[in-house]
Image: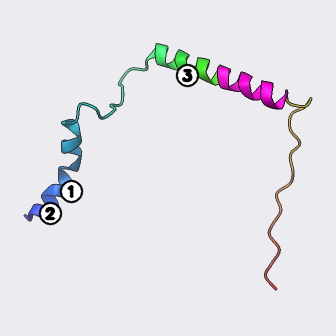
């Protein structure tokens, strides 16, 4: 077995030694979820204040168009 194949196999093992690498949580964090919801509410309020509310019935949907063929 060559040394190069070992490097490919062990790339993920090297990341396990890094304490600063974010880890996937096995259990959802309800406080983190609440923080994300709060952040989105703040962002949405700022956008509404800047752009105004949506028109009644939502934004108009424009049909998709195919590009004109090349001459």
Tag 1 and tag 2, C-beta contact below 8 Å: yes
Question: How far apart are the alpha carbons under marks 3 and 2?
Answer: 42 Å
Query: Dot 1 surroundings within 10 Å: few (below 14), some, or many (20 or more)?
Result: few
Q: Residue at x 82, y 57 (%)?
A: 64
Residue 65 position within the rendered picture, expressed as x and y whole percent measured from the top left: 83, 62
Q: Secondary structure at mark 2?
A: helix
State the mark number for residue 36.
3
Q: Which residues are magenta?
A: 42-53
What secondary structure do most residues of the magenta stretch adopt?
A: helix
Seen in the image, is 49 located left or right of residue 38? right
Specify which label sits upstream in the sequence, 3 or 1: 1
Q: Secondary structure at mark 1?
A: helix
State the mark number for residue 45.
none
Residue 15 position within the rendered picture, expressed as x and y whole percent measured from the top left: 23, 41
Q: Residue at x 82, y 32 (%)?
A: 51
Residue 43 is covered by the magenta coloring:
yes
Q: Which residue is mark 1?
A: 8
Seen in the image, is 23 located left or right of residue 61? left
Query: Dot 3 surroundings within 10 Å: few (below 14), some, or many (20 or more)?
Result: few
Q: Which residue is mark 2?
A: 4
Circle nearer the viewer, 3 or 1: 3
| Position of the N terminus by quadrant | bottom left
Q: Which quadrant holds residue 45?
A: top right
Q: Which quadrant holds residue 66?
A: bottom right
């Amino acid at each position: 077995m060559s040394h190069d194949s070992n490097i490919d196999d062990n790339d993920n093992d090297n990341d396990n030694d890094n304490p600063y690498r974010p880890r996937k949580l096995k259990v959802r964090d309800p406080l983190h979820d609440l923080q994300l919801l709060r952040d989105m509410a703040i962002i949405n309020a700022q956008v509404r204040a800047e752009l105004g509310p949506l028109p009644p019935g939502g934004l108009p949907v424009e049909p998709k168009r195919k590009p004109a063929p090349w001459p």
